[in-house]
Amino acid sequence: MKLYQLHSKQSFPISTSEAWTFLSDPNNLKVITPEHMGFKILSGDDRPMFPGQIIQYTVSPFPGYTTKWVTEITHVKEGEYFVDEQRFGPYALWHHKHFIKPVNGGAEMEDIIDYKIPFGILGQLAHPLLVKKQLKQIFSFREQKLIERFGVLENIKKELYFNSF
């Protein structure tokens, strides 16, 4: 089973505190997720983020298919990073690290997602055609929503790339 990695960086003219407040609130996931994904939080969004927090969602990654997704917040360093890991959902593995750090004129938000696709060779074949394409679309949507909300830092290049191991 192949391990894939998505790496994204984006910088905004806001403080790290403002970036943290937005990104660490599970309710804002709906704001930065495309509407066609049918994203809905079922539970776990009723208190500030903490290690051990379980958040349950439903999501429709493909038309006609809705699945439950359960994640656990496994690590939190207030104002700097947090990690969510899938406990149940559409991936064989989902480990998502969110980092926030100060940069000249604002804050940089970095995502590193290590993930595996289920279904063995069929999943590997589906990755470039469906999964990778959809993740690119989701992160492009997220980028636009964050720009609309916070603006853009000039002369800062955004990054989005995939690796496989």
Image (cartoon, rainbow, N blue to C red):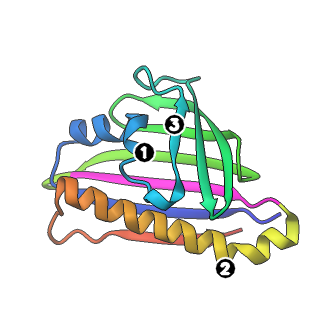
Looking at the rendered structure, the secondary structure element under dot 3 is: strand
Q: Which mark is residue 41?
A: 3
Span colored in magenta = 107-118
As helix, strand or loop, the secondary structure at mark 1 comes to helix
Please state, as top left, top right, bottom left or bottom right, where the C terminus lies in the image.
Answer: bottom right
From the image, tell me which residue sits under label 1.
29
- Which tag, 3 or 1, sits closer to the chain's start? 1
- Mark nearer the N terminus (2 vs 3): 3
Who comes first in sequence, dot 1 or dot 2? 1
Relative to 21, residue 161 above or below: below
- Name the residue beneath numbered marker 2: 129
Tally of numbered tags: 3
Work out whether residue 120 or residue 83 is closer to the camera in this orientation and state it.
120
Q: Residue furthest top?
A: 47
**Looking at the rendering, which quadrant does residue 162 occupy?**
bottom right
User: Three-letter amino acid code at disc 3?
Assistant: Ile
Q: Amino acid at mark 2?
A: Leu
* Mark pair 3, 1: CA separation: 9 Å
